[in-house]
């Protein structure tokens, strides 16, 4: 007894130029939001000291000073 054969998928239309991939809106929005929030913390580390370790704030300030110093 043979196993049933699965039909082959239809080939991609040649007129469109390739595969049509669509992402849901949140697949772009969430990484963008995370990037913007992290960038805001780096640009203004004083806001990051609300209840955390002060050493982390000093580290972020040091990184910011290094970045701005090398950008000049």
Image (cartoon, rainbow, N blue to C red):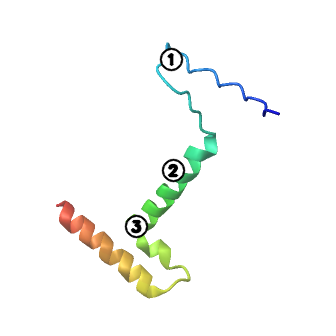
Q: Quadrant of residue 13?
A: top right
**Relative to residue 44, is residue 28 drawn left or right?**
right
- Residue ID for mark 3: 42
Give the distance between the C-alpha atoms of the residues marked 2 and 1, in whole angstroms: 29 Å
Measured in 3D between alpha carbons, the distance from the residue under mark 2 to the one under mark 3, in whole angstroms, is 15 Å
Badge 2 vs badge 3, beta-carbon distance below 8 Å = no
Q: Which-is-in-front pick, marks 3 and 1? A: 1
The residue located at (56%, 27%) in the rendering is 20
Q: Mark 3: which secondary structure?
A: helix
Helix, strand or loop under label 1: loop
Q: Quadrant of residue 12?
A: top right
Secondary element at image label 2 = helix
Q: Is residue 35 left or right of residue 51?
A: left
Q: Nearer the viewer, mark 2 or mark 1?
A: 1
> Which residue lies under the disc numbered 1?
16
First in sequence: mark 2 or mark 1?
Answer: 1
Q: Which mark is residue 32?
A: 2
Residue in front for this viewpoint, 34 or 68: 34
Q: Nearer the viewer, mark 2 or mark 3?
A: 2
Residue 31 percent coordinates (x, y) = 53, 52
Quadrant showing the C terminus: bottom left
Indicate the quadrant containing the N terminus: top left, top right, bottom left or bottom right.
Answer: top right
Mark 3 or mark 2, which is nearer the start of the sequence? 2
């Amino acid at each position: 007894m043979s196993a049933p054969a699965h039909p082959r998928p239809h080939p991609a239309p040649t007129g469109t130029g390739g595969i049509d991939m669509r992402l849901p809106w949140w697949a772009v929005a969430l990484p963008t939001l995370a990037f913007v929030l992290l960038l805001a913390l780096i640009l203004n580390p004083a806001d990051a000291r609300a209840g955390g370790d002060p050493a982390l704030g000093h580290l972020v300030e040091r990184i910011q000073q290094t970045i701005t110093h090398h950008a000049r």
